[in-house]
Amino acid sequence: MSEKPCCGFSVKMIYACSGASDTGEITDRAARQIRDDKIGYMSCLAGIGGGVDDLIEKAQAASKILVIDGCETDCGKKTFEKAGFDHFVHLRLNDLGLKKGETPVTDSRIQMVAEEGKKLLASQTIS
């Protein structure tokens, strides 16, 4: 995916797995926190997987993409790869010691994940 400005400016996009588990809720709420802190725009991961043209185009125009997954299944990462994206930063909650089914949702955990996501969006490295 090449970096292209959207509508005259570049934006950072955030996508969360938002799964049904505790860690899925944390990913969703952390992504919303990053959005609320005006670091980037949150968009619909299901739209990427469903091939919704408008949402794919917005992602293609992003200066940087953050994908947050709640567990090692990496649904978000796989969704982007299947859609043909190869330049995005990826955050997996397992890598932070948060395990699906064993991680009660707390404000401090949401904040921790949001801070890690912000660091990735600020970094120059895209994998």
Image (tube, helix red, strand yellow):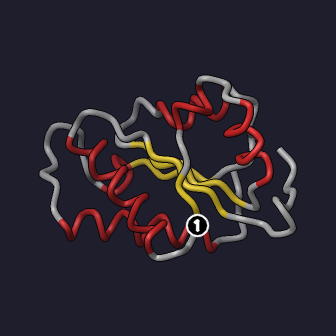
Q: Residue at x 53, y 41 (%)?
A: 44
Residue 54, image x, y percentages? 72, 38
Residue 66, image x, y percentages? 58, 54
- Kindly indicate the quadrant of the structure image that contains residue 22: top left
**Side (left or right) of 112 relative to 108:** right
Along the viewing direction, whichever of 82 and 15 lies nearer the viewer: 15
State the residue position of label 1. Answer: 40
**Side (left or right) of 106 relative to 59:** left
Indicate whether 125 appears above or below 27.
below
Q: Which quarter of the figure is the N terminus placed in? A: top right
Q: Residue at x 67, y 31 (%)?
A: 81
Q: Few, some or many C-alpha atoms within 10 Å of disc 1 (few <14, some 14-19, many ≥20)?
A: many
Indicate whether 68 appears above or below 53.
below
- Kindly indicate the quadrant of the structure image that contains residue 84: top right
Residue 55, image x, y percentages? 67, 39
**Side (left or right) of 113 relative to 38:** left
Indicate whether 30 appears above or below 108.
above
Q: Residue at x 39, y 67 (%)?
A: 33
Disc 1 marks a residue whose amino acid type is: Gly
Residue 11, image x, y percentages? 71, 65
Q: Residue at x 28, y 54 (%)?
A: 97
Look at the numbered disc 1 and give the secondary structure of its residue.
Answer: loop
